[in-house]
Amino acid sequence: MRYWLMKSEPYEFSIEDFAAQPNQTIAWEGVRNYQSRNFMRNQMTIGDQAFFYHSCCKDPGILGIAAISKPAYPDATQFNPASKYFDPKASPHNPRWFNVELTLIKRTRLVSIRELRQYPELQKMRVLQTGNRLSITPVDPAEWQFILTVL
């Protein structure tokens, strides 16, 4: 099993939106970064777990735990000209973008980025590194286990 941190801007899709989804499941669509796409397409498997993280807001941080519930498949938004995620270079025969499905396991208290930065055990965590802007990052198993102790 692998562990991940998946960011979402709360004004686009919040933990409240996630909890309100049918079966608390969502297609993690709209990712347009090749490295994040590759994580979903090549490394994520059913049962992997992820921290759900609010970014680009007053108090960014972890607000929930989710699990990969469906492996990567082509992101349909790339084929829809009306979508803000439309990609004219993509085709159903040659998709460029993929998504996984994610199911909410539970909501947690907010573990803010400020709090995460206070723990020496997390000093190498990718989300805490200067310049990290990826919407999906791997989480080391030791980091995962440590964060579970502070939730």
Image (spheres, rainbow, N blue to C red):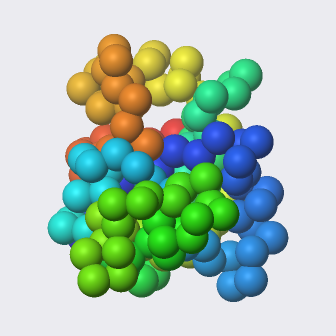
Report x, y in % for residue 100. 42, 72
Quarter of the image with the C terminus is top right
Question: How many dots with numbers?
Answer: 0
User: Relative to residue 70, is residue 15 depicted above or below?
Assistant: above
Q: Is residue 72 left or right of residue 77?
A: left
User: Relative to residue 80, is residue 7 depicted above or below?
Assistant: above
Q: Is residue 41 left or right of residue 81?
A: left
Along the viewing direction, whichever of 14 and 27 lies nearer the viewer: 27
Query: Can residue 27 be seen in this snapshot?
Result: yes
User: Relative to residue 28, is residue 111 depicted above or below?
Assistant: above
Quadrant position of residue 40: bottom left
- At horizontal 57% and vertical 70% (from top left) the residue drawn is 80
- At horizontal 27% and vertical 49% (from top left) the residue drawn is 34
- At horizontal 30% and vertical 64% (from top left) the residue drawn is 96
Q: Is residue 27 left or right of residue 4?
A: right
Query: Can residue 49 be seen in this snapshot?
Result: no
- At horizontal 45% and vertical 16% (from top left) the residue drawn is 118
Along the viewing direction, whichever of 121 and 77 lies nearer the viewer: 77
Quarter of the image with the N terminus is bottom left
User: Relative to residue 65, is residue 133 depicted above or below?
Assistant: above
Along the viewing direction, whichever of 58 and 150 lies nearer the viewer: 58
Q: Residue furthest left?
A: 42
Report x, y in % for residue 108. 66, 52
Report x, y in % for residue 53. 56, 44
Report x, y in % for residue 65. 54, 59
